[in-house]
Amino acid sequence: TYVSEKTDVYSLGNLLFQTMTRHQPWTWLEPHGRPSLDEIAAAKVQGKTPFIPMKFRNSTDFSIQALYHAIQECFVMDPTRRPSAYQIAYGLTQALRWKEKGIKNVTITREMFYH
């Protein structure tokens, strides 16, 4: 198994997921109930990610949009294609600055995490 700093980025995605949803990934939010550890492992091997409810995916809240996209990038299956922790922090900081300045006409996208 290949382990690098990008493994930590996947873990960062778990922390951001919990921050956004107030639930641990792969627990109470799954549409068909809480999966077993074997089911979680199989889902990860297949490149699946924890279920994120529509209220977060479709949120118009700037902060939620930024967290949602950051989480998606942290969970990219191929570790070599994940952004670094610095890039995630940079993207989230940029979104926070826009929010603080009252800038609302910016679309949060995955590209902001690849600075």
Image: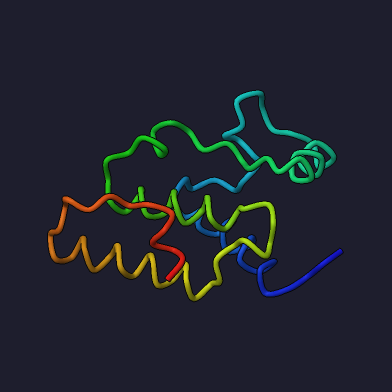
In the image, residue 61 lies at what x, y percent?
27, 45
User: In which quadrant of the rendered view does residue 67 lie?
Assistant: bottom left
Q: Residue at x 44, y 48 (%)?
A: 68
Residue extending farthest to the left is 102
Q: Residue at x 61, y 31 (%)?
A: 30
Looking at the picture, tell me which residue is in the foreground, 16 or 111: 111
Q: Is residue 102 above or below residue 36?
A: below
58 sits left or right of 83 in the view: left
Q: Residue at x 68, y 62 (%)?
A: 79
In the image, residue 52 lies at what x, y percent?
51, 38
22 sits left or right of 33 in the view: left
In the image, residue 78 lies at what x, y percent?
69, 56
Colour treatment of the image = rainbow
Q: Is residue 114 above or below residue 76?
A: below
Looking at the picture, tell me which residue is in the foreground, 115 or 20: 115
Q: Is residue 38 above or below residue 106?
A: above
Q: Residue at x 22, y 53 (%)?
A: 106
Q: How many marks?
A: 0
User: In which quadrant of the rendered view does residue 92 lie?
Assistant: bottom left
Q: Which quadrant of the rendered structure holds the C terminus? A: bottom left
Q: Which quadrant of the rendered structure holds the N terminus? A: bottom right
68 sits left or right of 35 in the view: left
In the image, residue 38 lies at what x, y percent?
85, 40
